[in-house]
Image (cartoon, helix red, strand yellow):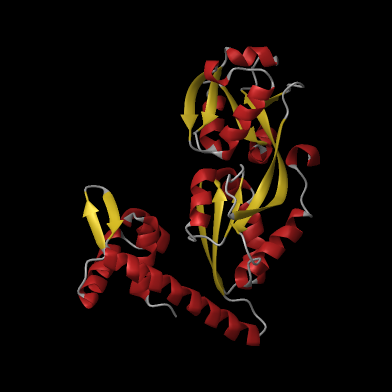
Amino acid sequence: MENFRLRVFRTVAELLNFTQAAEALHLTQPAVTLQIKSLESSLAARLFDRTGNRVKLTPAGEVLLKHARQIEELTQKAQAEVAAINGEQRGRLALGASTTIAQYILPPLVGKFLAAHPRIELFLYGANTGDVVTAVVDKRVDLAFIEGPPHRADLKIERFLDDEIVVIASPQHEWNALDGLQDMPLIMRERGSGTRTVVEMALKKAGLKVNKLHVAMELDSSEAVKSAVEAGLGIGFVSQWALRKERKLGTLAIVSMPRLRITRHLNFLYAQGPEPAGVTGSFLQFAREYSQTISEPLRAE
């Protein structure tokens, strides 16, 4: 129902990146550019300033984005209310998820939800925790799942699942002492990730000097960390949820360290105020119920 050119514009305006917008819309970049030029021609106004690799909204673009979001909201409301008459859920579900949750936990949850509500259109923004929090603040997503604390008083946080971050090594590893970590090459997630934040806090609590650690590599996903550890490049830290395949194949070993247990909560995150309603509210309730039916991987196997 939403005007296609407005949808393309809104996606580019929210991501401020034509390539990422094209990927999100399943279009080519030239097709996205053509839609924007057509809209600018219709309005007789430039909507974006493009300087080098940077994309920025013009004052006209800022005004149009405000109204485009209102139109999107009204469209979703109309679809939901009409669908409710027929006893079905319909609309757009905009979710954010930090990397580990997006890769290993959300797929089965989202699959079950969409199987029950096939008329719902899903948009998922996956990034590190800091970027996902920003997406909630900017209202690009209505509900998010994060691994670390948001450090925001204007956002509501609610427990989703428990998690444990474990130390992993190649199966040939020959140490299991906490003190040895100080000299081992470490494969760490990038700064800004929830995993990195929690790991550093736990290491400090255990008495290690984080700034003295030998961080050999910083990588932007658990898959990259696992691959580097499998290749013998160092010791890594990943969520227990990320290890199901490797545990079955025996390609990674979990290093037991009684003095270092890194636990955390995975959380829902949404704006302060009334609880999400409509499609987002339905998914939130579905996720709450789902969280009660699954066990932590290391304890279940």
Question: Where residue 65 sits: x, y (%)?
Answer: 37, 68
| Total marks in image | 0
User: In the depicted view, which residue is nearer to us: 214 or 87?
Assistant: 214
Residue 18 horizontal/vertical position (percent): 31, 57
> Is 88 drawn above or below residue 116 in the view shown?
below
Residue found at x 39% / y 69%: 66
Is residue 44 visible to the viewer in this orientation of the structure? yes
**Where does the N terminus fall, quadrant-wise?**
bottom left
Relative side of 121 to 56, left or right: right
126 versus 200 height, above or below: below
Is residue 175 visible in the rendered image? The answer is: no
Q: Answer left or right for 49 relative to 141.
A: left
The residue at 35%/63% (across/down) is 27
Q: Position of residue 287 (x, y in %)?
A: 69, 59
| Nearer to the camera, 41 or 270 | 270
Residue drawn 47% across the image and 58% down it:
138
Q: Is residue 222 above or below residue 252?
A: below
Q: Is residue 239 left or right of residue 69?
A: right
Where is residue 273, by image quadrant? bottom right
Where residue 155 sits: x, y (%)?
Answer: 59, 54
Quadrant the C terminus occupies: top right
